[in-house]
Image (tube, rainbow, N blue to C red):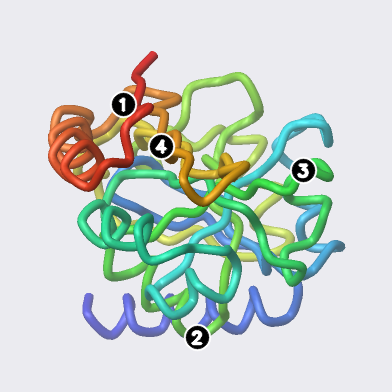
Amino acid sequence: MQNDREDQIKTATAIIKNGGMVVYPTETVYGLGADAFSEAAVRNVYKIKRRDLSLPISIAVSSFEMLHEVADIDSECFEIIAELLPGPVTILLRKKDVVPAILTAASEVVGVRFPDNEIATRIIKETGPITATSANVSGRNPPTCIEEVEVGLKLKVDLLGIIINGGKCKYSMPSTVVDMSKERARASEKREIKIKRKRACYDRVLHILRSKAVGEGLHRFSVP
């Protein structure tokens, strides 16, 4: 079993590097991963998901160093992010130029995941950032095990990549989304932090933001 898993990780890494895609496990739901820096690969993700190009797609990283490569993060925000990640949270941040416009629907904001899942992070460590979008047709329920990945999507992925079975996802629900992307007009202005979506580990996220953000004077913190 272990050898099979190792072979799958190696195969997935090679496929992504060659422009293909993989269905991979995370602690939230199964993701559809492709090279986040390849416009052609990202377009295939949109096509397979039947997702409108006006809707952005998040990316997944495997380290804080990789996170800094794709997003602008000041020291105040990083202290909070380091408490939240790795884990079932998507952080909205100002993107760096290396992130293709197709991923963000031409926005300057990118959603970033740092999964708490060994299979996912081992793949990303070798490939660099990959797409972090659920492995489902757009608008349908995200899969929490490979049995829930729709047959049609499975067939399309099989032509371009591989599906890795990592068992049932730990939380089996999408990530909680925290928006830290709003820039301050003045240095003296308090930073605005918002929880945009309440999902996995919401109570923990809320506790961290309340204790860290308010404690450091980053108020203007709001929840939906």
The answer for how far apart the CA atoms under marks 3 and 1 are is 24 Å
* Amino acid at dot 1: Arg
First in residue order: circle 2 vs circle 4: 2
**Which quarter of the picture shows residue 150?**
top right
Kindly identify which residue carries mark 2: 126
| Residue located 32% across and 41% down the image | 218
Marks 4/3: CA–CA distance: 17 Å
User: Which circle marks residue 199 in the picture?
Assistant: 1
Q: Mark 3 falls on what kind of element?
A: loop
Amino acid at circle 2 = Glu
Residue 96 is marked as none
Q: Residues within 10 Å of mark 2 (few under 14, many from 20)?
A: some
Q: Residue furthest front?
A: 188
Q: Quadrant of the C terminus?
A: top left
Which label sits in the foreground, 2 or 4?
Answer: 4
Indicate the quadrant where residue 96 lies. Answer: bottom right
Closer to the observer: label 1 or label 4?
4
- Residue at label 3? 107
Label 1 or label 4, whichever comes before in sequence order: 4
Residue on which the image places disc 4: 178
Q: Earlier in the sequence, mark 1 or mark 2?
A: 2
Q: Amino acid at mark 3?
A: Ser
Name the image quarter holding the N terminus: bottom left
CA–CA distance in space, label 2 to label 4: 27 Å
Mark 2: which secondary structure?
Answer: helix
Residue contact at pointers 2 and 3, CB within 8 angstroms = no
Which of the two discs, 1 and 2, sits closer to the camera? 1
Residue 86, position in %: x, y? 28, 60
Give how far apart the Cα atoms at labels 1 and 4 are: 11 Å
| Left or right position of 188 against 43 | left
